[in-house]
Amino acid sequence: METNQKGAALIVSLIILVLMTLLGLSSISTSSLEEKMTTNLRDHELAFQAAEIALRDAEKRISAFVTEPIATQDGSNENTWNTNAMDPTPTNAAPWWLERDAAWWNANGIASVNVANVATPPRYIIEELVFDNDDENKGTGSPVDGVVHYRITARGTGGSDQARVLLQSTVIKRY
């Protein structure tokens, strides 16, 4: 029997073992990253659905108006605000809805229906944008008829307050 073995099998098997370990660690890392991505996507979808529900709730509220509410600077009349009345810094170019935090929304937004599995109930703001007079009434002295354009801004959160979605819709109502 010859004894000229060099131990190559041991070295090769150790290299293969190290490679298999690295491959296993890589797949664990990828798996946990995919789980985080899935959780974030689910949170975002919940926030989007909550904001959609708030938009629909506000649209129903506007369609139920029998007479045109007088928009105010503080939303005190039928929760209808003057355009950009809630802007804390009207001189800058940023829209008001990007400058307001969760505390402001909780204090001033209209709470929509409860949605399961969200951190806070969705809320919305109704702004009166413009009143368009009907052309046939101009200069006749008759009561003013026309349409009012409203902007609805809705805010929804997901399973945590970190996932936030803002949606807007424009609604036109004839009075």
Image (cartoon, grey):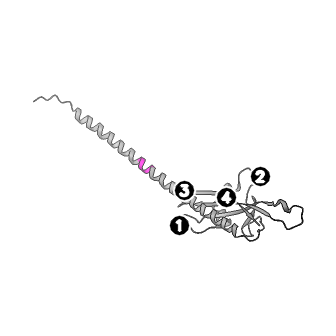
Residue at 60% across / 64% down in the picture?
53
Amino acid type at circle 1 is: Ala
Which mark is on residue 116? 1
What kind of secondary structure does the magenta stretch mostly adopt?
Answer: helix
| Numbered mark located on residue 169 in the image | 4
In the picture provided, is 94 more to the left or to the right than 146? left
Cα distance in 3D space between marks 2 and 3: 32 Å
Q: What x and y, as percent, mark residue 49?
A: 56, 60
Q: Amino acid type of disc 4? A: Ser
Q: Residue 41, percent across and down? A: 51, 54
Q: Nearer the viewer, mark 4 or mark 1?
A: 4
Residue 148 rendering spot, x and y as whole percentages:
76, 62
Q: Residues within 10 Å of mark 3 (few under 14, many from 20)?
A: many
Label 2 – label 1 distance at C-alpha = 39 Å
Could you say which disc has been placed on residue 44 in the image? 3
In primary-sequence order, the first of circles 4 and 1 is 1
Quarter-of-image position of residue 138: bottom right
Quarter of the image where the C terminus is located: bottom right
Nearer to me, 156 or 145: 145
Q: Which residues lie in the magenta part?
A: 29-33
- Where residue 145 sits, quadrant-wise, is bottom right
- Identify whether 102 is placed above or below 25: below
How many residues crowd mark 2 within 10 Å: few (<14), some (14–19), many (20+)?
A: few
Q: Which is more N-terminal, label 3 or label 4?
A: 3
Q: Cα distance, mark 4 to mark 3?
A: 19 Å
- Distance in Å between CA atoms under marks 4 and 1: 23 Å
* Label 3 or label 1, whichever comes before in sequence order: 3
Q: Is residue 135 left or right of residue 76?
A: right
Q: CA distance from mark 3 to mark 1?
A: 14 Å
Tell me whether the residue at label 2 lies in contact with that at label 3, contact meaning CB atoms closer than 8 angstroms: no
Task: Please tell me which of labels 2 and 3 falls first in the chain.
Answer: 3
Q: Which residue is mark 2?
A: 91
